Amino acid sequence: MNREKEIFIDLKERSYKIEIKRGLLEEIGKKIKKIKEYNKIVIITDENVGKFYLDRLTKTLREENFLVYDIIIPAGEKSKNLYETEKVYNDLALYKITRGDLIITLGGGVVGDLGGFVASTFLRGIDFIQVPTSLLSQIDSSIGGKVAVDLPSGKNMVGSFYQPKGVFIDPELLKTLPTRYLHDGLGETIKCGLIRDKKLFELFENIKGDSEVLERAEEIIFGCCMVKKVMVENDEFDRGDRMILNFGHTIGHSIEKNYNYETYTHGECVSIGMCEITKISEKLGLTPKGTADRIKILLEKFSLPTTTTLSKEKILEGISSDKKNFGNKINLIILKDIGNGEIFKIDSKDLEKYIV
């Protein structure tokens, strides 16, 4: 029996549910009816995802008598910018969308981030729902209300905290995901195990390969979402423990930026970042010896990169403009052990000592 899993994100008046079920895409029209009576719904998706799922989602919405429009953006991180955002705003205005209408983001992290940011700012905020289609977006970017677009100077530099009205996760959608992007998502799922769920990390050590990942998708997604639930509920606006979710990201974001968001995917950069920072924290005696090797072996099992040829100077340059910096302080996320991440605060002037 295909039973639905639900996770309630308790943020008082901004609370919502994450629903996980195979075949859920076909039920979204009925699900939205239970949330609120909307008139118009605009689906924001990209060229790749739209080919597979736009017609199916549109059908289930029209069966519930919603007026449905769509906006299709080019696929890829390059679209997550203010130029594409303005085009989406103009389309919404053309469709005469009001604050009583709804946006659905159908896609991976780029669509979710851009569409969520548009929802948070158009008419000073309209409701939106996330329908993530990649593993990375199903376990990470669709949850927690971080919405943003990139600037030439860095990733996610313009954004806000804006919670969705719901997140509908259909693991069946992962079947059309190219292998590289399934592995991309595994970078972040393994991260969840490393920072807060040792059993999840060990599950991945025992998984034989991609087919087993897809078979156990509900279990994996649920585990990652539970890690994020606790973090988001305790620190909605990312000023404290929620920053532990950024394990691997300080170096990872610098790598992304240096390669102009083209050479590596986000999950690949996070994989490199997790290995590099753990090697450093081991040398400093902050993490047990052998942890970096254990992480490296697991990541390489799923064809994820674990090293970079970027120079120390280039990495430092990228980190210096990271939005996670606080004045003269930088928060590095390290592992006290597998399943136990913590924030390690350093002065920015000392950063060079910790990036080797």
Image: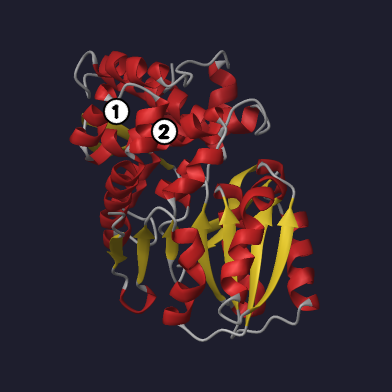
Quadrant of the rendering where the C terminus is positioned: top left
Q: What residue lies at 71% left-to-right and 42% top-to-bottom?
A: 78
Quadrant of the rendering where the N terminus is positioned: bottom left
Q: CA distance from mark 2 to mark 1?
A: 9 Å
Q: Where residue 217 appears, x then y in whole percent?
A: 36, 41
The image quadrant of residue 277 is top left
The numbered disc on residue 145 is none
Q: What residue lies at 38% left-to-right and 55% top-to-bottom?
A: 238
Of 40 and 55, nearer the camera is 55
21 is higher (above) or lower (below) than 245: below
- Secondary structure under tag 2 reads helix
**Which amino acid type corresponds to the residue marked 1 in the rendered image?**
Phe
Drawn side of residue 48 relative to residue 132, left or right: right
Q: What residue is pinned by disc 1?
A: 204
Q: What residue is pinned by disc 2?
A: 186
Q: How is the image coloured?
A: secondary structure
Q: Where residue 190 appears, x then y in whole percent?
A: 34, 32
83 is higher (above) or lower (below) than 323: below
Q: What residue lies at 29% left-to-right and 22% top-to-bottom?
A: 281
Q: Where residue 109 appears, x then y in whole percent?
A: 55, 48
The image quadrant of residue 261 is top right
Q: Is residue 161 something that shows in the picture?
A: no
- Secondary structure under tag 1 reads helix
Q: Where residue 17 appears, x then y in whole percent?
A: 35, 67
**Which amino acid type corresponds to the residue marked 2 in the rendered image?**
Leu
Taking the view exactly as shown, the residue that stands out farthest to the front is: 1
Residues tagged 2 and 1 counted as in contact (Cβ below 8 A) = yes
20 is higher (above) or lower (below) than 28: above
Few, some or many residues within 10 Å of mark 1 (<14, 14–19, 20+): many
Drawn side of residue 219 relative to residue 101, left or right: left
If you read the primary sequence from the N terminus, does the residue marked by circle 2 or circle 1 appear first? 2
